[in-house]
Structure formats: C-alpha cells, structure tokens
Amino acid sequence: MSVDLNEPVYLSVDTIKNTIVFDKDGVEIGKIDDLLIDKENNRIACAVLSFGHHLMGIGNKYLAIPLEAFKYRKRPGDYALEQLGDDYVLDVDKSVLENEEGFDRNEPLTQTELLKSYTQYKIKPYWEK
C-alpha cells in the first residue's frame, strides 16, 4: 500500500470539537465536546463525548472515551450533511452509553477514571505503551 505524503492526515482540535458522533447502527449519539491532553506525557488522553440531545448541552452526560475508540469517517460527496463536515463512528450501542456513568466537567478527570474507559473499550492505555 502506497502512502501519499502530500495528503493531509492531521486534524486540528477545532476541527474535531463539535464533530457529530454516530453509533455502529448510524444513529447520532452526540458530539465530541473536547479533547483532554495529558500535560505530563504530551498526549491526547481522551475525547469527551457529549452524550444526549438536550438544548445547548444542558443535561447532557459527558463521557471520557479513548480517541482510538472512534473511527474517523469521511462523508461521501453526495451526503446530505456534507456542509457539516466529516464525522466519527463509535462502535457501541447507544444503550451502553445510556447506562455509563459520566463525569463532572467541573472536576479534573483522574487516571483511575480514565483507566476504566480504556478497559471498557479494550484499548491499551497510552501510558502503558
């Protein structure tokens, strides 16, 4: 497989934030609200999924999910929502997210809390790689 080194492969945080996320069945489940950076390791620790469809995010649940759990999806040129940009797919049922405990955006996320998410999504934590 040949790699085109002139093809852009990087996304800015501003591009990723507010990206719509769909579940594996194509149902919209939320949006990426933010990315959390590990200040000691200079790595993206996780994406923050704003789960729910409440007005202006009020009442939404925030879930810390490893960015590796999301699959980037480039929308085809004839896609009806093309003006909104590309999106992400999270291979999980919406019911799993409904039962998952969110975290308080006003409190710092601990590595113990983040480890639970990495374990749930069967992804080796970046700090162990």
Image (spheres, rainbow, N blue to C red):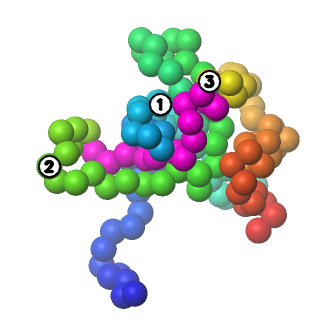
Could you say which is closer to the camera, residue 33 or residue 87? Answer: 87
C-alpha span from label 3 to label 1: 10 Å
Q: Quadrant location of the C terminus? A: bottom right
Amino acid type indicated by mark 3: Glu
Q: Residues within 10 Å of mark 2 (few under 14, many from 20)?
A: few
**Magenta part of the chain:** 85-97
**Residue 90 is one of the magenta-drawn residues:** yes
Taking the spot 33% from the left edge, 68% from the top edge, the residue there is: 8
Which element is circle 3 on? helix
Which element is circle 2 on? loop
Residue 100 versus residue 122 in the image, above or below: above
**Among numbered discs 3 and 1, the one appearing first in the sequence:** 1
Report the residue marked by disc 1. Answer: 29
C-alpha span from label 3 to label 2: 32 Å
Report the residue marked by disc 3. Answer: 98
Amino acid type indicated by mark 2: Asp
